[in-house]
């Protein structure tokens, strides 16, 4: 069993009657988050959907915004910039960038579950500028290079 981090949450006036983000099952990795507004997302369109709350994430953590698999499979609705990152120092309203990759308009109704929030530890890096990098079998092989049966 892992220890839960504590995230302060402030309801905004337009989110006063909405459910807070919550885990749907005991084994769920993400907390479902609901829309605080109603709108229709046309095919190919995207929008930042209000959630009606802001959060204060502890130092050393982020909260990732991820799509809901059912919306993606059934309707082609996904989150852009996935996973989206909410930084520990952001205090504005949490919004979810949704895109309609489907072929039909999709209505988002206030109170609908639209995404998942997953807290995650952040590992910071220090970059060291060098003149050369070590060699590897893959080398400079780019996109798709490891799936061709050939290296290079």
Image: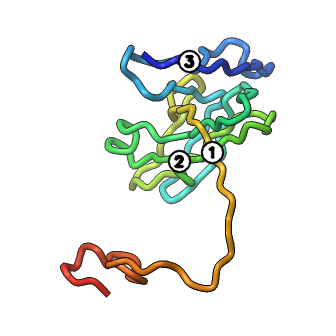
Q: Is residue 128 above or below residue 22?
A: below
Q: Position of residue 41 (x, y in %)?
A: 55, 47
Q: Is residue 3 above or below residue 131?
A: above
Q: Position of residue 37 (x, y in %)?
A: 66, 31
34 or 62, which lies in front?
62
CA–CA distance in space, label 3 to label 2 = 21 Å
Which of label 3 and label 2 is nearer to you? 3
**Residue visible at 63% across and 85% down in the picture:** 131
Q: Is residue 144 above or below residue 32?
A: below
Q: What colour scheme was applied to this rendering of the protein?
A: rainbow
Q: Which residue is mark 3?
A: 4
Mark 1 secondary-structure assignment: strand
User: Which quarter of the figure has residue 63?
Assistant: top right
- Circles 1 and 2: CB distance less than 8 Å? yes
Determine which of the numbered discs, if any, sits on residue 85 in the image: 1
Which of label 1 and label 3 is nearer to you? 3
Q: Residues within 10 Å of mark 2 (few under 14, many from 20)?
A: some
Q: Earlier in the sequence, mark 1 or mark 3?
A: 3
Determine which of the numbered discs, if any, sits on residue 83 in the image: 2
CA–CA distance in space, label 1 to label 2 = 6 Å
């Amino acid at each position: 069993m892992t220890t839960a981090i504590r995230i302060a949450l402030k309801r905004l006036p337009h989110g006063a009657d909405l459910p807070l983000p919550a885990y749907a099952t005991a084994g769920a990795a993400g907390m479902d988050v609901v829309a605080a507004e109603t709108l229709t997302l046309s095919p190919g369109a995207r929008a930042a959907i209000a959630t009606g709350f802001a959060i204060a994430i502890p130092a050393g953590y982020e909260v990732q915004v991820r799509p809901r698999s059912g919306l993606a499979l059934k309707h082609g609705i996904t989150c852009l910039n996935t996973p989206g990152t909410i930084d520990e120092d952001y205090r504005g309203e949490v919004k979810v960038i949704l895109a309609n990759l489907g072929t039909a308009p999709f209505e988002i109704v206030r109170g609908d579950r639209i995404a998942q929030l997953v807290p995650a530890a952040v590992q910071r890096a220090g970059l060291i500028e060098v003149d050369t990098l070590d060699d590897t079998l893959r080398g400079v092989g780019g996109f798709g290079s490891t799936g061709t049966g050939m290296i290079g």
